[in-house]
Image (tube, rainbow, N blue to C red):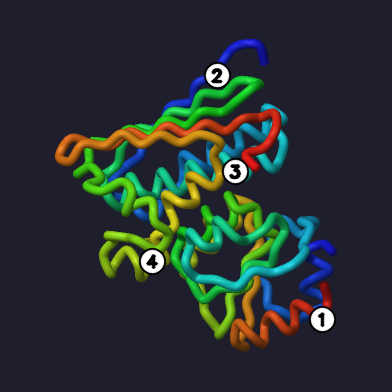
C-alpha cells in the first residue's frame, strides 16, 4: 500500500508527505533509536513518541515507510522541514502507540 | 565499477541535530552506484551507529568508506577517551551514555552490537586516552549468516 493510500484508509494526520508513493508494510513500535535501527524493517510504519531531529536520520537509514507520531506528539518546524527535505513521510495521531498499532493492523 | 571508491567525512563532535549526515550521504552514494538494498541497509545501520558513537563519546572523528564491487569497508577513527573494556562495551544493553543522551533516544547499549550484527567482519582497536579505530567490512556477495 502507498503512504497516500495508508493515510486515506486510517485517517491519521499528515505532518509532511514528501513521498506519497512510498510503499508501506508492517509496523514497528519503539523510541530507542538503536533498537529501531536494528529491528524495524524496510517499509515499516515506525510508531514512536520521539520527536527530536534524529528521527529523520533513523527513518532514512532504516528505510521505514513512514514515521507515525503517537500520543499527540508534535514536531518543531525545523524537524518537519528536514523530513520534507530528506523525503521522510511523517504522520501523527492523538491515540496511544498501542491503539495506533491496532489501527495500522486493520489496514495493512 | 573497476576501481575502489573512497568517501571521507569529518564527523562533528558537538552537533547532535546533524548527527547521521555522513551515513545518509553514504546511503545516497550507494543507491546511485546501484548496490542491493539489503547491503545498503546494513552499511547504513553499521555506519550510523559508529557515527553516533563518535559524536556521543569521542567528540567527533573521521569516517572513511571504501567501496568496491566485492565489499564495502567502513573505517572510523577518533581521538576520544578510548574504550576501557571492549568485551563489556560489546554487550547488548551496556552503555556509558549520559541521561541527556538517553533522553534523545540514544544510549540503549545497542550501538556496537548493531554494528557487529550488520557487518561481516568488525575489528576494534582502542587505547584509553588515545582513541578508537573501528573497521567494519560488509561483503557484497553472500551474506553474514
Residue A46 in the image: state x and y as whole percent: 63, 67
Same chain assignment for discs 1 and 4: no
Q: Residue at x 71, y 41 (%)?
A: B37
For the question of whether residue A97 can be seen, the reply is yes
* Numbered label attached to residue B104: 4
Residue B28 in the image: state x and y as whole percent: 61, 37
Chain letter for mark 3, please. B
Q: Which secondary structure lies at badge 1?
A: helix
Q: Nearer the viewer, mark 3 or mark 1?
A: 3
Q: Which secondary structure lies at badge 3?
A: helix
The residue singled out by tag 2 in the image is: B5
Q: Residue at x 63, y 32 (%)?
A: B30
Residue A42 in the image: state x and y as whole percent: 70, 55
Marks 3 and 4, Cα distance to the nearest angstrom? Answer: 23 Å
Query: The C terminus of chain A lies in which quarter of the figure?
Result: bottom right
The residue singled out by tag 3 in the image is: B42
Marks 3 and 2, Cα distance to the nearest angstrom? Answer: 18 Å
Which tag, 3 or 2, sits closer to the chain's start?
2
Residue A77 in the image: state x and y as whole percent: 49, 66
The residue singled out by tag 1 in the image is: A106
For the question of whether residue A15 can be seen, the reply is no
Amino acid at each position: 500500500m502507498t503512504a497516500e493510500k495508508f493515510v486515506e484508509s486510517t485517517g491519521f494526520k499528515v505532518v509532511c508527505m514528501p513521498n506519497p508513493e512510498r510503499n508501506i508494510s508492517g509496523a514497528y513500535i519503539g523510541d530507542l533509536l538503536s533498537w529501531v535501527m536494528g529491528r524495524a524493517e524496510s517499509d515499516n510504519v515506525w510508531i514512536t513518541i520521539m520527536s527530536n531531529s534524529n528521527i529523520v536520520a533513523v527513518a532514512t537509514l532504516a528505510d521505514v515507510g513512514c514515521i507515525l507520531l503517537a500520543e499527540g506528539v508534535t514536531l518543531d518546524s525545523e524537524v518537519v522541514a528536514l523530513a520534507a527535505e530528506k523525503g521522510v513521510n511523517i504522520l501523527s495521531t492523538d491515540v496511544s502507540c498501542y491503539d495506533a498499532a491496532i489501527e495500522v493492523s486493520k489496514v495493512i | 565499477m573497476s576501481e575502489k571508491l573512497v568517501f571521507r567525512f569529518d564527523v562533528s563532535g558537538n552537533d547532535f541535530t546533524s548527527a547521521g549526515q555522513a551515513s545518509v550521504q553514504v546511503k545516497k552514494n550507494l543507491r546511485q552506484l546501484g548496490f542491493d538494498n539489503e547491503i545498503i541497509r546494513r552499511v547504513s545501520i553499521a555506519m550510523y551507529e559508529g557515527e553516533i558513537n563518535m559524536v556521543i563519546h569521542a567528540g567527533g572523528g573521521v569516517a572513511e568508506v571504501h567501496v568496491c564491487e566485492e565489499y564495502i569497508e567502513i573505517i572510523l577513527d577518533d581521538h576520544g577517551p578510548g574504550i576501557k573494556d571492549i568485551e563489556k562495551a560489546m554487550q547488548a544493553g551496556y552503555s556509558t551514555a549520559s541521561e541527556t543522551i538517553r533522553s534523545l533516544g540514544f544510549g540503549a547499549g545497542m550501538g556496537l552490537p548493531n554494528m557487529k550484527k550488520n557487518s561481516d567482519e568488525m575489528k576494534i582497536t582502542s587505547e584509553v586516552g588515545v582513541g578508537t579505530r573501528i573497521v567494519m567490512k560488509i561483503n557484497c556477495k553472500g551474506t553474514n549468516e
